[in-house]
Amino acid sequence: MMETPAKRIALYGGTFDPFHNAHREVVRSALSQLPVDCVFVMPLGQAPHKNRRISPAAFRFEMARLGVEGIEGAIVSDDEISTPGVDYTYETVLRLKEQFDPEIIYILAGSDVLSSIDSWFRVRDLLREATLAVVRRGSDHSGDMQAKAKELQKRCGARVVFFDMPPLTLASSDLRARIEKGQALNGQCPAQVESLIQRHHLYTFSSVY
């Protein structure tokens, strides 16, 4: 993934189906506000919690690659795509530690993760291995987030930090629905991502995707 070892790593995983402007802004904001050398943008291969069929990994990887072009320190990784079986963040973090021996690994996540993280695989072990970096959007209630973070820290020994991004409220599911209905994305994805979606008719047939 990298020739030069990175000592301060952030991991940003997801389906990225499609990769949109809010995803890009999370990466930009993390690189500017967290003490990290790089952000690994990592499209998942086989999701543990997804009931719907997701787009082929090659397309999602390419959308992520195009989506972060021009952002220094953003690296799109196929680690989870190329690793057989269901993808769990805990196992991904262990692989990153084995490869890079970093001083610290941050896991980038939305504020909703503070309520849902108990469903994650081996969450207590994961939170011993990595620091949770929670992004605050403009509409998020800071007091509620701080309270949930303190509860998680007390209960699981978690390390939680926060960083900010503009109040974008994009959702990949909404963008897929727009495309299925024949509606334009209107710049809600990076231009090259929109071009790839149009060129390959992604999401046009809801029965397939």
Image: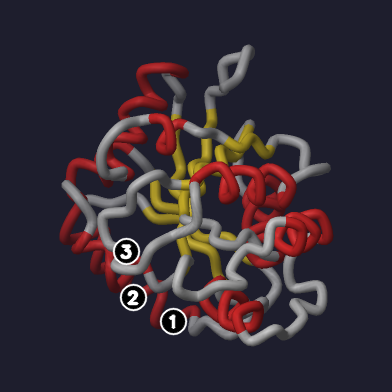
Kindly check if marks 1 and 3 are in contact, taking CB atoms under 8 A apart as contact.
Answer: no
On-image quarter of the N terminus? top right
Which residue is painted at 55% across and 72% down in the image? 205
> Toward which corner of the image does residue 176 lie, by quadrant?
bottom right
Give the residue furthest to the top.
3
Circle 1 sits on which residue?
Answer: 143
Q: Is residue 154 visible in the rendered structure shown here?
A: yes
Q: Which mark is residue 60?
A: none
Q: Viewer-proximal residue, 117 or 66?
A: 66
Kindly check if marks 2 and 1 are in contact, taking CB atoms under 8 A apart as contact.
Answer: yes
Q: Viewer-proximal residue, 10 or 148?
A: 10
Q: Give amino acid for label 3.
A: Lys
Crowd around label 2: few <14 · some 14–19 · many ≥20 (10 Å): few
Q: Secondary structure at mark 2?
A: helix
Observer-side mark, 3 or 2, equals 3
Horizontally, is 140 left or right of 101 in the view? right
Q: Secondary structure at mark 3?
A: loop
Please tell me which of labels 3 and 2 falls first in the chain: 3
Residue 91 location in percent, x, y? Answer: 28, 35
Horizontally, is 101 left or right of 75 in the view? left
Which residue is painted at 67% across and 39% down in the image? 74
Crowd around label 1: few <14 · some 14–19 · many ≥20 (10 Å): few
Residue 156 location in percent, x, y? Answer: 18, 54
Please tell me which of labels 1 and 3 falls first in the chain: 3
Q: Is residue 137 visible in the rendered structure shown here?
A: no
Q: Give amino acid for label 1.
A: Gly
> Toward which corner of the image does residue 186 lie, by quadrant?
bottom right
Residue 187 location in percent, x, y? Answer: 81, 73
How far apart marks 3 and 2 lie (CA) works out to: 28 Å
Circle 3 sits on which residue?
Answer: 50
Q: Viewer-proximal residue, 106 or 1?
A: 1
